[in-house]
């Protein structure tokens, strides 16, 4: 018998809206000020990772021999967030990625619950600016979890809050760390992006416009039959 999905947990940055690019630009600006150069390949490692963990990775890349004080690190993280907030100032429903609105509409119409699973402290604010908050039955942001992605807590937290068994959940991600988190939660992982870093997802598409609700459910059911 086919099992049906009861909850879909969506990542925000890079899945619902292209804020992943703004995070990249903001970190790049900060890194340049610190004389640290990094490229888009390195940036893949920052996707899905919390603000402070991202800063640590960038500082480690710079090979700074003298450890910075916590106060200095907090100042650098706040500076990056300032650049980021400037970049997202103009964000509007026009910045929802292609196919996502239809996907959320189909998801809602099918009576499958919807949650957000984001590592960002800015997530609730961005959802509001995109005018999407009403779609969500539950929101997990950085404030709710002890351990960020790749730990499964972001995803299990949403399932627990809505009383859904993990094997009846689907998680949607653009980050390798996010797919790791979904897989370790025992959920069905859907990835959007390149095979080179998302090959471990159960189902993957290249672009958000290829994320179709029916296809996701069909692949989930095939996975559950195994
Ligand atoms: C994730 C992004 O969603 O949120 C990361 O993929 C980002 O790039 C992280 O660092 C934390 O976001 P914020 O808004 O709390 O700095
Ligand atoms: Mg993301």
Image: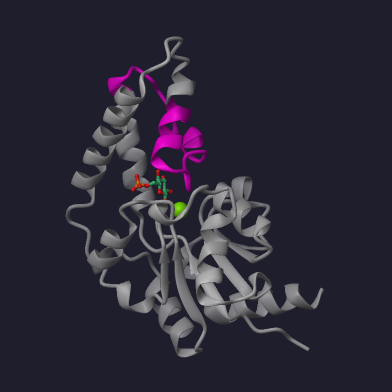
Give the magenta-colored segment's residue range.
Answer: 32-58
Residue 73 at x, y percent in the picture = 34, 26
Q: Quadrant of residue 183?
A: bottom right
Residue 50 at x, y percent in the picture = 43, 43
Residue depicted at 66% across the width and 52% down the height: 199
155 to 75, vertically: above or below: below
Residue depicted at 42% across the width and 72% down the height: 138
Asked whether 63 falls inside the magenta stretch, the response is no
Q: Nearer the viewer, residue 216 or 69?
A: 69
Residue 21 at x, y percent in the picture = 36, 47
58 to 166, vertically: above or below: above
Q: Quadrant of residue 164?
A: bottom right
Q: Which quadrant of the figure contains the N terminus? A: bottom right
Q: Is residue 97 left or right of residue 197?
A: left
Q: Which quadrant of the figure contains the C terminus? A: bottom right
Coloration mode? one colour
Looking at this view, name the residue that lies furthest to the right: 226
Q: Nearer the viewer, residue 70 or 178?
A: 70
Residue 94 at x, y percent in the picture = 25, 67
Q: Is residue 187 left or right of residue 21?
A: right
153 to 69, vertically: above or below: below
């Amino acid at each position: 018998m086919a099992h049906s999905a009861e909850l879909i947990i969506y990542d925000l940055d890079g899945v619902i809206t292209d804020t992943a690019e703004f995070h990249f630009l903001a970190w790049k600006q900060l890194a340049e000020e610190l004389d640290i150069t990094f490229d888009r390949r390195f940036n893949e490692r920052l996707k899905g990772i919390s603000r402070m963990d991202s800063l640590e990775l960038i500082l480690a890349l710079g090979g700074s021999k003298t450890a910075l004080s916590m106060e200095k690190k907090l100042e650098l993280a706040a500076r990056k967030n300032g650049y980021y907030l400037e970049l997202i100032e103009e964000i509007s429903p026009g910045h929802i990625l292609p196919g996502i609105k239809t996907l959320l509409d189909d998801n809602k119409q099918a009576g499958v619950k919807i949650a957000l699973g984001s590592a960002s402290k800015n997530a609730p604010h961005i959802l509001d600016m995109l005018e999407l908050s009403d779609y969500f039955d539950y929101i997990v942001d950085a404030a709710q979890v002890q351990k960020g992605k790749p730990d499964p807590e972001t995803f299990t937290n949403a399932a627990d809050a809505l009383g859904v068994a993990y094997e009846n959940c689907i998680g949607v991600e653009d980050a390798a760390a996010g797919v790791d988190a979904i897989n370790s939660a025992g959920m069905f992982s859907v990835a959007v992006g390149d095979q080179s870093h998302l090959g471990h997802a159960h189902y993957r598409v290249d672009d958000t416009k290829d994320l179709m609700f029916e296809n996701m459910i069909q692949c989930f059911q095939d996975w559950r039959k195994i």
